[in-house]
């Protein structure tokens, strides 16, 4: 426990069986330290997304070991993994995945309500705080279909932040955005690492984006190049 | 698990799909309403018929049947004791219809804790004469107080009172009989019995049961009057009727008294076997129709939940990604179906009640049942409890498979697809 590793993998390996057996992830040993802003790059099909979903605990079909916050996650049950995700991981995907049934504020609060660490009022206060950081506080009571693509992605980031996650993971979070909005999202991530020492792990094929991060992990054919 | 949050999510999903939700709930409403209306109606019918027949039948009746001796003289012979004896042309023995030692038996029975009360009776077939007409019928000599207590006979006395029978030589005759013979209260009716006795009795009332076959032949007098016109002594009793606190034990009690008093004993279930069958069939019909309707409603719920799951794949995926477990997702969808079932079911109860009231007010006139004016309904809270439990069971079962499916949605598959 004397190190500050947020994520560590030992010999992470994954196969796909459909249509033929093939190894997507090959013996990946990786560790991410607290406060790092890391990007994973590589050609399309090199296994970046697959690796990220293994690290996210959502994909449990793999060989090797995965540690989050020095705790062995491999082999834990669905409910325990859900709890780990709730407490320790915030997600931002290419698509925003906001619930159309709720307004912006409620969307941001939802993972917090699930975790139940803070009271309703406190959560609301915190959600507004995050929306303010992202310049979205005036949209708090809008329904999600009243927002632009860039705005939706910023709401998704606020949602990822609500439980003070250990790490924020993103799969091409700027992939659907134009240059301007993409830069805006990058600046938000940058600010989070600088101001709050937020650990961030982003899969991207945008090399401009990757070049600005602290550390670049390059994948090729299911392996990481050092 | 945070059920408030789960219910909140379920509720928002429903609101977003209000139209389909309403359609699914209406299916449940319809099923429950029909079930309640049917069961209430069928049981109303059952009660009506039970009231007409069963309530007038004693739980146990003790009497002397005309039949051959069970112990023939040959059976007593030592010589043939071990043989199988065939006896031809046995004739029934005339022991008389009188119950031997009736008063002692009645006294014993009245002390039995299982018995509500005992009503002795004298019945005989007679001929009613008025002018030149002669009509065959029956006269029942009854103990007015006991008969009224056990069989509510005063309900059927349309003119006059049962207690009027305490006057000497008075009689209450069936309405049908009175109409045929053009008799009114205060008239004298002549009665001849099978042993040739003649008596003149004063009519003090009419009885109307609503079953023409009975109203056309039946008459009531006091025990004493009946004994007198039959030329029998004060201890002449042909039937001992008794009602039990627990009528389900009637068959066993009848058997016991048959042995104890050496009398024939008939329990009401045996006496009215055909009515019991009718009641059972009606119950089965109403329950099966209700269940079929609910199964159909269940498929409706199954459909809408399945549809919702396909539509809400993204939401399920993000819920799982952000910390909701498979169980949480399962409970969201089970709550969905419970909400549909509960609202649909409660409306079903309300509409079921309304339908029952409507049926209750539909005129229903038939000559054989003159006392019945509208269709009968049995308002019973038990049907409503069964109805809502049915609704919840079907909705939970039909929601269970979609819910399990939703709980197994793999978020990675959904998120990668975008
Ligand atoms: N469900 C799947 N079944 C079989 N093969 C898959 C599946 N998902 C992805 N793949 C394959 O695995 C490889 C890695 O995919 P992915 O991790 O999405 O790559 P990247 O994100 O780097 O573009 C690709 O060749 C892709 O075709
Ligand atoms: Mg990818």
Image (cartoon, coloured by chain):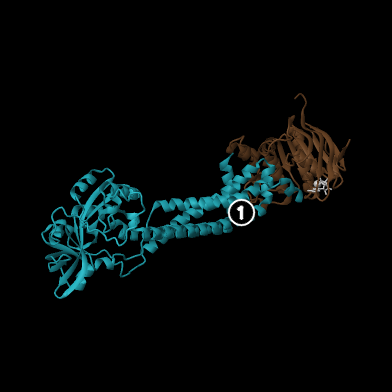
Chain colours: A brown, B cyan
Q: Name the residue located 19 percent from the left edge and 46 percent from the top edge.
A: B104
Left/right placement of residue B192 relative to residue B395 reads left
A215 or B205: which is nearer to us?
A: B205
Q: Quadrant of the N terminus of chain B?
A: top right
**Quadrant housing residue B51:** bottom left
Q: Name the residue located 16 percent from the left edge and 56 percent from the top edge.
A: B223
Residue B286 picture location, percent across and down: 45, 59
Residue A203 can be seen in this image: no
B147 or B268: which is nearer to us?
A: B268
Residue B337 picture location, percent across and down: 56, 51
Residue A134 picture location, percent across and down: 71, 42
Residue A101 picture location, percent across and down: 62, 51
B383 or B316: which is nearer to us?
A: B383
Q: Would you name the residue on which mark 1 appears?
A: B305
Left/right placement of residue B55 relative to residue B3 reads left
Left/right placement of residue A129 relative to residue B366 reads right
SS type, badge 1:
helix
């Amino acid at each position: 426990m004397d190190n500050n590793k947020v994520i560590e993998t030992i010999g992470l390996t994954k196969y796909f069986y459909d249509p033929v057996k093939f190894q997507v992830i090959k013996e990946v040993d990786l560790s991410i330290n607290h406060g790092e802003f890391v990007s994973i790059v590589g050609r399309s099909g090199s296994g970046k997304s697959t690796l990220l979903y293994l690290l996210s605990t959502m994909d449990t079909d793999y060989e090797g070991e995965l540690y989050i916050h020095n705790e062995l996650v491999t082999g834990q049950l669905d409910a325990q993994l859900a709890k780990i995700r709730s407490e320790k991981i915030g997600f931002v995907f290419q698509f925003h995945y906001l619930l159309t049934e709720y307004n912006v504020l409620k969307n941001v609060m939802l993972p917090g309500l699930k975790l139940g660490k803070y009271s309703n009022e406190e959560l609301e206060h915190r959600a507004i705080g995050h929306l303010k950081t992202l310049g979205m506080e005036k949209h708090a009571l809008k329904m999600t279909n009243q927002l632009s693509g860039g705005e939706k992605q910023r709401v998704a980031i606020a949602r990822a932040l609500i439980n003070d996650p250990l790490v924020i993971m993103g799969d091409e979070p700027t992939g659907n955005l134009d240059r301007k909005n993409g830069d805006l999202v990058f600046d938000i991530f940058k600010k989070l690492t600088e101001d709050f020492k937020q650990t961030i792990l982003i899969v991207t094929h945008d090399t401009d984006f990757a070049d600005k991060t602290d550390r670049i992990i390059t994948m090729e054919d299911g392996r990481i190049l050092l | 698990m945070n059920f408030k949050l789960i219910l909140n999510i379920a509720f928002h999903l429903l609101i977003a799909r209000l139209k389909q939700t309403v359609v699914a709930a209406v299916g449940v409403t319809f099923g429950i309403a029909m079930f309640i209306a049917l069961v209430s109606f069928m049981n109303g019918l059952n009660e009506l018929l039970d009231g007409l027949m069963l309530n007038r039948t004693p739980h146990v009746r003790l009497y002397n049947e005309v039949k051959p001796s069970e112990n023939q003289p040959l059976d007593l012979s030592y010589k043939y004791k071990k043989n199988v004896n065939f006896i031809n042309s046995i004739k029934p023995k005339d022991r008389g219809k009188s119950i031997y030692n009736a008063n002692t038996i009645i006294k014993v029975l009245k002390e039995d804790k299982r018995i509500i009360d005992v009503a002795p009776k004298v019945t005989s077939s007679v001929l009613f004469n008025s002018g030149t007409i002669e009509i065959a019928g029956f006269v029942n000599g009854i103990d007015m107080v006991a008969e009224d207590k056990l069989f509510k006979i005063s309900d059927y006395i349309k003119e006059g009172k049962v207690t009027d029978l305490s006057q000497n030589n008075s009689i209450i005759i069936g309405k049908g009989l009175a109409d045929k013979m053009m008799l009114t209260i205060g008239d004298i009716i002549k009665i001849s019995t099978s042993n040739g006795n003649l008596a003149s009795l004063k009519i003090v009332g009419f009885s109307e049961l609503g079953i023409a076959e009975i109203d056309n032949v039946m008459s009531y007098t006091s025990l004493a009057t009946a004994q007198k016109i039959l030329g029998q002594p004060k201890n002449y009793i042909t039937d001992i009727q008794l009602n039990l606190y627990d009528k389900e034990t009637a068959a066993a009690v009848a058997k016991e008294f048959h042995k104890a008093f050496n009398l024939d004993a008939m329990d009401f279930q045996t006496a009215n076997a055909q009515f019991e069958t009718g009641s059972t069939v009606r119950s089965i019909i109403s329950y099966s129709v209700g269940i079929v309707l609910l199964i159909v409603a269940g498929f409706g719920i199954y459909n809408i939940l399945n549809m919702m799951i396909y539509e809400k794949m993204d939401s399920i995926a993000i819920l799982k990604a952000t910390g909701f477990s498979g169980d949480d997702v399962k409970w969201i969808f089970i709550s969905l179906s419970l909400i549909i079932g509960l609202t649909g079911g409660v409306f079903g109860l309300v509409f079921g009640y309304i339908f029952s009231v409507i049926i209750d007010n539909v005129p229903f006139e038939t000559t054989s049942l003159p006392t019945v004016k509208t269709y009968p309904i049995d308002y019973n809270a038990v049907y409503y409890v069964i109805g809502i439990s049915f609704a919840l069971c079907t909705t939970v079962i039909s929601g269970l498979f979609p819910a399990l499916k939703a709980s197994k949605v793999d978020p990675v598959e959904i998120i990668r697809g975008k």
